[in-house]
Image (cartoon, rainbow, N blue to C red):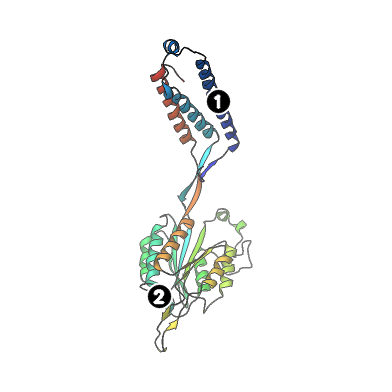
Amino acid sequence: MDPKLEFVMPQRLWLLLAVVALAASYIALQARRSRYAVRFTNLALLDRVAPKRPGWRRHLPALLLLIALTGMVGAFAQPARMTRVPRERATIIVAIDTSLSMQATDVDPSRLVAAQAAANEFVDKLPARLNVGLVTFNGIAKVAVPPTQNRDELHAAIDQLRLGERTAIGEAIYASLDAIGVDTSDPGAGGDGTGDDPADDPADDDPVPARIVLMSDGSTTVGRPDAQAAAAAKRAGVPVSTIAFGTPYGTIDLEGQEGPISVAVNPEALAAIANATDGTAFTAETGAELQQVYDDIGSSVGYTTEQRDITTTFVGVSLVFLFGAAVLSQLWFSRLP
């Protein structure tokens, strides 16, 4: 059975036993008829008195009828298929690390260029009705593009990313929450810990789902701690999916520093954020892997599954078999099955 196929009233499928019983009785009657035929010892006489049987054709209308009955029982059980459909509304914040370590070339042609290409493709593949925002962060975090459906504005901002010193992942999460519209100023107030009591705002009865997709190659070196920011996201009900991008062998050259500086990726720190916010942690060491990660995230945050009734499909297919049985029976035997 199709794993995406469900029945709203599965108990009605017990009626299939009646179809099985009908098939069994048909087989028994045919066997009984064959035994009667064997009683004629004079086969020449049997050929003259008994009409020639059309062989397998006489069983085909019965088979089609049984298939039609099976389909009608399935329709009676109210079949439904779980279908993947684009979300009608949601807010997704793409947070991209723009610290100096992103110039490392352990990812071809560099971490930053590969991240830009993957982020642009990710934005394009999201459903058009979703609001998507962009947060960039190095030593400071800023909302480069507030949530919008204007993909051209997002592409322009992604293409113009500039690198800076240090890394403020915690501040990036806070900036993302601000872009979504979460009040993080007073975590002790309100029923949801965001500073507002949802009971006071009827609009909060059906909140717009939101998610942060944070890509970084390092760990926090400045700003509020990751754990504090993750706790704020958790209280707000905003999962943070993290992507640790890069290899353990990345290096960069900085002016005034002797020799290359190691900028190994830190997946553990990012995984802790994802785990604390009910998000998902990913790792990627190449541009292709990063794009695959974005595709996986897009499938989960940009789409949802809905139950679609397919009773009419079952009825339609059953009618095709039923009419097939009727037509063949009339053509071959001048009667209905």
Q: Residue at x 41, y 63 (%)?
A: 291
Image location (x, y in percent) of residue 162: 39, 75
The reply to whether residue 251 is in sight is yes
Q: Nearer the viewer, mark 2 or mark 1?
A: 1
Image location (x, y in percent) of residue 308: 49, 42
Mark closest to the chain's N terminus, 2 or 1: 1
| Depicted 309 relative to depicted 49: above or below | below
Task: Determine crowd level at label 2: few under 14, some 14-19, many 20+ residues with C-alpha closer than 10 A.
Answer: many
Q: Name, please, the residue furthest toward the front.
A: 41
Q: Nearer the viewer, residue 335 or 160?
A: 335
| Depicted 106 relative to depicted 90: above or below | below
Q: Residue at x 48, y 30 (%)?
A: 67
The reply to whether residue 157 is in sight is no
Q: Residue at x 38, y 74 (%)?
A: 110
Q: Nearer the viewer, residue 332 or 157?
A: 332
Amino acid at pointer 1: Leu
- Secondary element under disc 1, as helix, strand or loop, is helix
Amino acid at pointer 2: Asp
User: In the rendering, which numbered label is found on residue 22?
Assistant: 1
Q: Is residue 30 left or right of residue 148?
A: right
Image location (x, y in percent) of residue 113: 37, 71
Instruction: Name the residue that disc number 2 marks.
Output: 106
Q: Residue at x 47, y 32 (%)?
A: 315
- Secondary element under disc 2, as helix, strand or loop, is loop
Image location (x, y in percent) of residue 169: 51, 73
Q: Are marks 2 and 1 in contact (CB under 8 Å)?
A: no
